[in-house]
Amino acid sequence: MRFVHTFLAILGLALAAPGGAQPRGAECLIPSKPGGGMDLTCKLAQKALHGQPGAPELQLSYLPGGVGAVAWHTIVSQRRAEANTLVTFSGGSVLNLALGKFGDADVDDVRWVAAFGADYGMIAVRADSPWQSLDDLLNALKRDPKKVLIGMSGTVGSQDWIKMALLAQMAGIDPRKMRFVALEGGGEQFIAMQENHVQAVSGDTSEALLYTGGGKVRVLAVLSEQRLPGALANVKTAREQGYDVVWPVIRGVWMGPDVREADYRRWVQAFDNMEASPEFAEKRARAGLYPFSLTGDALTRYIKQSVAGHHRQARQFKLLRER
């Protein structure tokens, strides 16, 4: 018993606030409206950290706007040193950063804490849509791109736009002739599609899983290397359907730039412990995410490499903003 008590005490110290006092709670800030992948990311962290020795309870809050830009600038300009505020991000956030959609923001403006899951891009329509396959949708776009409204998170140059643009380009369609509707997160996309404001959605698999259960959504393609396990196991990849587009989407959290080193490392350790627990893999799978684990310095290097890769990709569509 003495060993157990000692172990728990050490683990608690690793997660404790400066001076040894446990924080009563912490905030997971979601830079979108409820219902999308950002929301899902914070909720996964909240559930997975719950009950861990020394870990604070995560409280969720929402700060939508600019597809992440409002939350980014709020933390960087006004809340730089908050030791118990985490902000969720996705691969789309990293792309927007690379494209200059956060203004003059840079990778080093924040502290990258942990990525603890990934999902994949997907294309979906309503269940009563006449389009049964990716070919059907792309052929409709080829006949008249103005007649199909596509819902996406963000604007031209966002990851949802680029995913659809790559598919369209392979089908011989000029992406700039397509009609997109910019929405704030995956939740808004699927609501807009259900109300027929848009006829298709370019989004992510984890978001689709939140809406496929009721039989109202048909996923036409997943943008993964192979078919995905679970509820989407019968959905063909875009690659299977003749369109070689693969789009993984990592999900995780970052913190303000002036957070003290001890506090930053405390959170890195918390997520290392979380991801090492046997129960976490099950929680991640239930959230519709797939294994992807990087924390601290390793995650920071990955983000920098991703930004460099997005710069190269964006030149293909002439999306980079000159600084």
Image: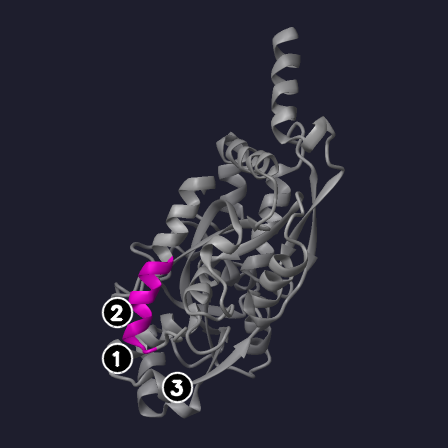
In the displayed structure, does residue 151 sit left or right of residue 30? left
- Amino acid type, label 3: Met
- Amino acid type, label 2: Tyr
Q: Are the residues at dot 1 and dot 2 in contact (C-beta closer than 8 Å)?
A: yes
Q: Are the residues at dot 3 and dot 2 in contact (C-beta closer than 8 Å)?
A: no
Residue for badge 1: 171
Residue span colored magenta? 307-318
> From what the image shows, is residue 49 above or below residue 80?
above
Instruction: Tell which circle, 3 or 2, labels the residue nearer the N-terminal end.
Output: 3
Instruction: Tell which circle, 1 or 2, labels the residue nearer the N-terminal end.
Output: 1
Residue depicted at 25% across the width and 63% down the height: 240
Q: Position of residue 244 (x, y in %)?
A: 25, 66
Residue depicted at 29% across the width and 55% down the height: 225
Disc 1/disc 2 C-alpha distance (Å): 8 Å
Residue depicted at 42% across the width and 81% down the height: 130
Mark 2: give few (<14), some (14-19) or many (20+) Cα within 10 Å. Answer: some
Residue depicted at 56% across the width and 60% down the height: 210
> From what the image shows, is residue 290 above or below residue 32?
above
Instruction: Tell which circle, 1 or 3, labels the residue nearer the N-terminal end.
Output: 1
Residue for badge 3: 178
Q: Quadrant of residue 35?
A: bottom right
